[in-house]
Image: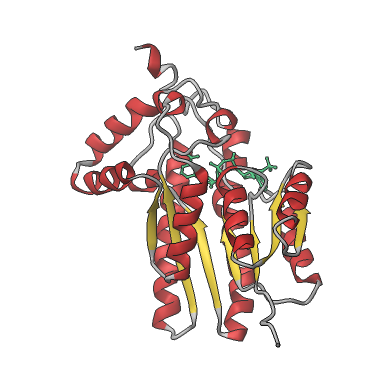
Amino acid sequence: MKTEPRKLAMITGASSGIGFELARVFAKNNYDLIINSSSNSLMDKVDELKDLGVEVTGVIADLATREGAEELYMKANYAGRPIDVLVLNAGVAVGGEFLENDFEDELNLMNLNMVYLVYLAKKVMKDMAQRNEGKVLFTSSIAAEMPGPYYATYAASKSFVQSFAEAIRYEMKDTGRNITVTALQPGPTDTNFFERGNMEHTMVGESDSKDDPAQVAQDGYEALMKGKDHVIGGSIKNSIQAAAAKVMSEKQRASIHGNMTKPDSMKQ
Ligand SMILES: NC(=O)c1ccc[n+]([C@@H]2O[C@H](COP(=O)([O-])OP(=O)(O)OC[C@H]3O[C@@H](n4cnc5c(N)ncnc54)[C@H](OP(=O)(O)O)[C@@H]3O)[C@@H](O)[C@H]2O)c1
Protein backbone atom coordinates (compact mmCIF):
# COMPACT_ATOMS: atom_id res chain seq x y z
CA MET A 1 0.00 0.00 0.00
CA LYS A 2 1.32 3.44 -0.95
CA THR A 3 1.75 5.83 1.97
CA GLU A 4 1.48 9.61 1.70
CA PRO A 5 4.84 11.42 1.97
CA ARG A 6 5.20 13.31 5.22
CA LYS A 7 4.73 17.06 5.22
CA LEU A 8 7.43 19.42 6.48
CA ALA A 9 7.13 22.03 9.25
CA MET A 10 9.80 24.62 10.06
CA ILE A 11 9.71 25.89 13.65
CA THR A 12 11.87 28.66 15.09
CA GLY A 13 12.79 28.87 18.77
CA ALA A 14 12.24 25.15 19.18
CA SER A 15 14.96 24.32 21.72
CA SER A 16 12.68 24.94 24.70
CA GLY A 17 9.28 26.03 25.95
CA ILE A 18 6.37 26.52 23.59
CA GLY A 19 8.51 26.03 20.45
CA PHE A 20 9.80 22.64 21.57
CA GLU A 21 6.27 21.55 22.49
CA LEU A 22 5.02 22.73 19.09
CA ALA A 23 7.74 20.62 17.47
CA ARG A 24 6.56 17.62 19.50
CA VAL A 25 2.94 18.11 18.45
CA PHE A 26 3.94 18.32 14.78
CA ALA A 27 6.16 15.22 15.09
CA LYS A 28 3.33 13.29 16.76
CA ASN A 29 1.14 14.30 13.83
CA ASN A 30 3.68 12.82 11.41
CA TYR A 31 5.39 15.99 10.20
CA ASP A 32 9.09 16.03 9.38
CA LEU A 33 10.76 18.99 11.04
CA ILE A 34 13.31 21.70 10.51
CA ILE A 35 13.89 23.21 13.92
CA ASN A 36 15.92 26.25 14.85
CA SER A 37 17.33 28.09 17.80
CA SER A 38 20.52 30.07 18.43
CA SER A 39 22.27 27.72 20.87
CA ASN A 40 23.80 24.24 20.83
CA SER A 41 21.09 22.93 23.15
CA LEU A 42 18.98 22.59 19.99
CA MET A 43 20.84 19.44 18.99
CA ASP A 44 19.69 17.49 22.08
CA LYS A 45 16.14 18.30 21.01
CA VAL A 46 16.80 17.04 17.49
CA ASP A 47 17.66 13.61 18.92
CA GLU A 48 14.65 13.64 21.25
CA LEU A 49 12.26 14.49 18.40
CA LYS A 50 13.77 11.88 16.07
CA ASP A 51 12.69 9.26 18.62
CA LEU A 52 9.10 10.10 17.58
CA GLY A 53 9.83 8.52 14.18
CA VAL A 54 10.10 11.56 11.89
CA GLU A 55 13.01 13.25 10.12
CA VAL A 56 14.40 16.19 12.05
CA THR A 57 16.99 18.73 10.90
CA GLY A 58 18.39 21.23 13.38
CA VAL A 59 19.68 24.59 12.18
CA ILE A 60 21.49 26.67 14.79
CA ALA A 61 21.16 30.27 13.64
CA ASP A 62 20.71 33.60 15.40
CA LEU A 63 17.44 35.00 14.08
CA ALA A 64 18.16 38.42 15.54
CA THR A 65 20.56 38.86 12.62
CA ARG A 66 20.06 38.98 8.87
CA GLU A 67 22.86 36.42 8.37
CA GLY A 68 21.15 34.01 10.77
CA ALA A 69 17.76 34.41 9.11
CA GLU A 70 19.31 33.92 5.66
CA GLU A 71 21.23 30.87 6.83
CA LEU A 72 18.06 29.26 8.18
CA TYR A 73 16.17 29.94 4.95
CA MET A 74 19.06 28.61 2.79
CA LYS A 75 19.57 25.46 4.85
CA ALA A 76 15.83 24.80 4.98
CA ASN A 77 15.74 24.89 1.21
CA TYR A 78 18.88 22.83 0.70
CA ALA A 79 17.00 19.52 0.60
CA GLY A 80 14.62 20.93 -2.00
CA ARG A 81 11.51 20.04 -0.04
CA PRO A 82 8.71 22.58 0.26
CA ILE A 83 7.92 23.96 3.69
CA ASP A 84 4.26 23.15 4.25
CA VAL A 85 4.00 24.82 7.63
CA LEU A 86 6.01 27.77 8.94
CA VAL A 87 5.97 28.45 12.68
CA LEU A 88 7.62 31.73 13.67
CA ASN A 89 7.85 31.27 17.40
CA ALA A 90 11.31 32.46 18.55
CA GLY A 91 11.00 35.50 20.78
CA VAL A 92 12.45 37.13 23.87
CA ALA A 93 11.43 39.77 26.40
CA VAL A 94 13.48 42.50 28.06
CA GLY A 95 12.04 43.18 31.50
CA GLY A 96 12.65 46.27 33.59
CA GLU A 97 12.28 50.03 33.39
CA PHE A 98 12.65 51.39 29.89
CA LEU A 99 15.12 54.06 31.04
CA GLU A 100 17.30 51.44 32.73
CA ASN A 101 17.25 48.76 30.05
CA ASP A 102 20.16 48.32 27.66
CA PHE A 103 19.36 49.42 24.11
CA GLU A 104 21.42 46.53 22.69
CA ASP A 105 19.08 44.06 24.43
CA GLU A 106 16.07 45.92 23.08
CA LEU A 107 17.58 45.98 19.59
CA ASN A 108 18.11 42.21 19.80
CA LEU A 109 14.44 41.85 20.84
CA MET A 110 13.14 44.04 18.02
CA ASN A 111 15.30 42.26 15.43
CA LEU A 112 14.22 38.80 16.60
CA ASN A 113 10.56 39.43 17.45
CA MET A 114 9.79 41.65 14.45
CA VAL A 115 12.44 42.43 11.80
CA TYR A 116 13.67 38.96 10.86
CA LEU A 117 10.26 37.45 11.61
CA VAL A 118 8.99 39.60 8.73
CA TYR A 119 11.99 38.59 6.62
CA LEU A 120 11.40 34.86 7.11
CA ALA A 121 7.65 35.19 6.62
CA LYS A 122 8.25 36.97 3.31
CA LYS A 123 10.81 34.44 2.02
CA VAL A 124 8.86 31.33 2.94
CA MET A 125 5.41 32.68 2.05
CA LYS A 126 6.63 33.66 -1.43
CA ASP A 127 7.56 29.99 -1.92
CA MET A 128 4.17 28.94 -0.56
CA ALA A 129 2.49 31.35 -2.98
CA GLN A 130 4.29 29.67 -5.91
CA ARG A 131 2.68 26.37 -4.91
CA ASN A 132 -0.49 28.14 -3.76
CA GLU A 133 -0.44 26.18 -0.52
CA GLY A 134 0.79 26.75 3.00
CA LYS A 135 0.05 27.41 6.65
CA VAL A 136 1.77 29.95 8.89
CA LEU A 137 1.61 30.20 12.68
CA PHE A 138 2.95 33.21 14.55
CA THR A 139 3.52 33.03 18.29
CA SER A 140 2.08 36.34 19.42
CA SER A 141 0.83 36.90 22.99
CA ILE A 142 -2.13 38.19 24.96
CA ALA A 143 0.34 41.01 25.74
CA ALA A 144 -0.42 42.14 22.19
CA GLU A 145 -3.80 43.35 23.49
CA MET A 146 -2.42 45.91 25.98
CA PRO A 147 0.46 48.25 26.67
CA GLY A 148 3.15 46.45 28.71
CA PRO A 149 4.85 48.71 31.26
CA TYR A 150 8.19 47.26 32.49
CA TYR A 151 8.60 45.25 29.32
CA ALA A 152 7.41 47.96 26.98
CA THR A 153 9.35 46.95 23.87
CA TYR A 154 8.23 43.34 24.27
CA ALA A 155 4.49 44.08 24.47
CA ALA A 156 4.85 46.53 21.59
CA SER A 157 6.63 43.85 19.53
CA LYS A 158 3.76 41.42 20.12
CA SER A 159 1.20 44.07 19.09
CA PHE A 160 3.24 44.37 15.91
CA VAL A 161 3.19 40.59 15.35
CA GLN A 162 -0.55 40.40 15.99
CA SER A 163 -1.38 43.27 13.65
CA PHE A 164 1.02 41.96 11.00
CA ALA A 165 -0.46 38.44 11.18
CA GLU A 166 -4.03 39.70 10.91
CA ALA A 167 -3.16 41.99 8.01
CA ILE A 168 -1.35 39.42 5.90
CA ARG A 169 -4.04 36.86 6.67
CA TYR A 170 -6.52 39.29 5.11
CA GLU A 171 -4.24 39.84 2.11
CA MET A 172 -3.90 36.09 1.50
CA LYS A 173 -7.69 35.68 1.47
CA ASP A 174 -8.34 38.84 -0.49
CA THR A 175 -5.90 37.84 -3.22
CA GLY A 176 -7.28 34.30 -3.37
CA ARG A 177 -4.16 32.58 -2.11
CA ASN A 178 -4.44 29.24 -0.39
CA ILE A 179 -2.23 30.26 2.54
CA THR A 180 -3.66 30.52 6.04
CA VAL A 181 -2.20 32.67 8.80
CA THR A 182 -2.90 32.03 12.48
CA ALA A 183 -1.76 33.91 15.58
CA LEU A 184 -1.18 31.93 18.78
CA GLN A 185 -1.68 34.18 21.81
CA PRO A 186 -0.41 32.51 24.96
CA GLY A 187 -0.89 33.96 28.42
CA PRO A 188 1.78 33.46 31.10
CA THR A 189 3.31 30.06 30.33
CA ASP A 190 5.78 28.00 32.32
CA THR A 191 8.96 28.32 30.20
CA ASN A 192 12.42 29.95 30.37
CA PHE A 193 10.85 33.16 29.09
CA PHE A 194 10.68 35.05 32.41
CA GLU A 195 14.18 34.14 33.59
CA ARG A 196 15.70 34.94 30.21
CA GLY A 197 13.87 38.27 30.09
CA ASN A 198 14.96 39.29 33.61
CA MET A 199 11.35 39.02 34.79
CA GLU A 200 11.52 36.20 37.30
CA HIS A 201 11.05 38.61 40.26
CA THR A 202 7.73 40.01 39.10
CA MET A 203 4.19 39.07 40.01
CA VAL A 204 3.71 37.30 36.69
CA GLY A 205 7.17 35.70 36.77
CA GLU A 206 6.66 34.24 40.25
CA SER A 207 3.07 33.19 39.70
CA ASP A 208 2.53 29.46 40.18
CA SER A 209 -0.54 29.39 37.93
CA LYS A 210 1.27 29.60 34.61
CA ASP A 211 0.07 27.46 31.75
CA ASP A 212 1.65 24.24 30.56
CA PRO A 213 3.55 24.91 27.30
CA ALA A 214 2.37 21.53 25.95
CA GLN A 215 -1.27 22.67 26.25
CA VAL A 216 -0.48 26.03 24.63
CA ALA A 217 1.26 24.24 21.74
CA GLN A 218 -1.66 21.86 21.26
CA ASP A 219 -4.07 24.83 21.14
CA GLY A 220 -1.87 26.52 18.53
CA TYR A 221 -1.63 23.39 16.40
CA GLU A 222 -5.39 22.81 16.43
CA ALA A 223 -6.17 26.43 15.54
CA LEU A 224 -3.63 26.31 12.70
CA MET A 225 -5.10 23.10 11.31
CA LYS A 226 -8.59 24.61 11.42
CA GLY A 227 -7.29 27.74 9.64
CA LYS A 228 -8.42 30.02 12.49
CA ASP A 229 -7.25 33.63 12.60
CA HIS A 230 -6.09 33.44 16.21
CA VAL A 231 -6.30 31.40 19.37
CA ILE A 232 -5.79 32.42 22.98
CA GLY A 233 -3.57 29.55 24.17
CA GLY A 234 -3.72 27.84 27.57
CA SER A 235 -6.32 28.20 30.31
CA ILE A 236 -9.68 29.96 30.16
CA LYS A 237 -8.40 32.80 32.39
CA ASN A 238 -6.34 34.05 29.42
CA SER A 239 -9.44 34.29 27.24
CA ILE A 240 -11.26 36.17 30.01
CA GLN A 241 -8.29 38.54 30.41
CA ALA A 242 -8.07 39.17 26.67
CA ALA A 243 -11.82 39.80 26.43
CA ALA A 244 -11.75 42.15 29.45
CA ALA A 245 -8.81 44.05 27.92
CA LYS A 246 -10.91 44.86 24.87
CA VAL A 247 -13.45 46.84 26.92
CA MET A 248 -10.98 48.66 29.21
CA SER A 249 -9.34 52.00 28.58
CA GLU A 250 -5.69 52.05 27.51
CA LYS A 251 -4.78 53.48 30.92
CA GLN A 252 -6.61 50.69 32.79
CA ARG A 253 -4.96 48.05 30.66
CA ALA A 254 -1.52 49.56 31.20
CA SER A 255 -2.11 49.76 34.95
CA ILE A 256 -3.26 46.14 35.35
CA HIS A 257 -0.52 44.82 33.11
CA GLY A 258 2.14 46.97 34.78
CA ASN A 259 1.20 45.63 38.24
CA MET A 260 2.08 42.16 37.00
CA THR A 261 5.34 43.04 35.27
CA LYS A 262 6.85 45.65 37.63
CA PRO A 263 10.25 44.52 38.99
CA ASP A 264 9.97 43.18 42.55
CA SER A 265 6.18 43.58 42.40
CA MET A 266 5.82 40.47 44.62
CA LYS A 267 7.36 42.37 47.53
CA GLN A 268 4.78 45.14 47.56
N1 LIG B 1 6.17 32.09 28.28
C1 LIG B 1 5.23 33.00 28.20
O1 LIG B 1 4.62 33.39 29.20
C2 LIG B 1 4.82 33.55 26.85
C3 LIG B 1 3.59 34.23 26.75
C4 LIG B 1 3.20 34.75 25.52
C5 LIG B 1 4.01 34.59 24.41
N2 LIG B 1 5.20 33.93 24.53
C6 LIG B 1 6.03 33.80 23.33
O2 LIG B 1 6.30 32.44 23.09
C7 LIG B 1 7.46 32.32 22.29
C8 LIG B 1 8.33 31.23 22.85
O3 LIG B 1 8.78 31.61 24.14
P1 LIG B 1 8.82 30.60 25.37
O4 LIG B 1 7.88 31.09 26.37
O5 LIG B 1 8.71 29.22 24.89
O6 LIG B 1 10.28 30.91 25.94
P2 LIG B 1 11.66 30.11 25.87
O7 LIG B 1 11.54 28.77 26.51
O8 LIG B 1 12.69 31.06 26.39
O9 LIG B 1 11.86 29.88 24.30
C9 LIG B 1 12.41 30.85 23.45
C10 LIG B 1 12.99 30.14 22.23
O10 LIG B 1 13.51 31.13 21.33
C11 LIG B 1 14.87 30.79 21.03
N3 LIG B 1 15.64 31.99 20.74
C12 LIG B 1 15.95 33.01 21.58
N4 LIG B 1 16.72 33.92 20.94
C13 LIG B 1 16.89 33.45 19.68
C14 LIG B 1 17.58 33.93 18.54
N5 LIG B 1 18.26 35.09 18.58
N6 LIG B 1 17.56 33.19 17.41
C15 LIG B 1 16.88 32.02 17.35
N7 LIG B 1 16.20 31.52 18.41
C16 LIG B 1 16.20 32.23 19.55
C17 LIG B 1 15.36 30.04 22.28
O11 LIG B 1 16.43 29.17 21.98
P3 LIG B 1 18.01 29.50 22.19
O12 LIG B 1 18.19 30.02 23.56
O13 LIG B 1 18.65 28.16 21.97
O14 LIG B 1 18.34 30.45 21.10
C18 LIG B 1 14.13 29.21 22.60
O15 LIG B 1 14.10 28.07 21.79
C19 LIG B 1 8.10 33.70 22.26
O16 LIG B 1 7.80 34.35 21.02
C20 LIG B 1 7.40 34.43 23.39
O17 LIG B 1 7.35 35.81 23.16
C21 LIG B 1 5.62 33.41 25.71
Residue 182: % across, % down = 45, 64
Residue furthest to the front in view is: 1
Residue 106 seen in this snapshot: yes
Instruction: For ligand 1, give the image quadrant.
Output: top right
Residue 190: % across, % down = 50, 36
Instruction: Report the colour scheme.
Output: secondary structure
Q: Quadrant of residue 12?
A: bottom right
Q: Looking at the image, which is closer to me, 193 or 247?
A: 193
Q: Looking at the image, which is closer to me, 81 or 116?
A: 81
176 is higher (above) or lower (below) than 253: below
Residue drawn at x 63%, y 49% is 13
Q: Quadrant of residue 203?
A: top left
- The mark tally for this picture is 0
**In the displayed structure, does residue 190 sit left or right of residue 2?**
left
Q: Quarter of the image for the N terminus: give it.
A: bottom right
187 is higher (above) or lower (below) than 74: above
**In the displayed structure, does residue 133 sit left or right of residue 65?**
left
Residue furthest to the right in view is: 78
Residue furthest to the top in view is: 267
Q: Quadrant of residue 267?
A: top left
Residue 67 seen in this snapshot: no
Residue drawn at x 73%, y 62% is 53
Q: Quarter of the image for the C terminus: give it.
A: top left
Residue drawn at x 47%, y 48% is 215
Residue 135: % across, % down = 53, 71
Residue drawn at x 75%, y 57% is 50
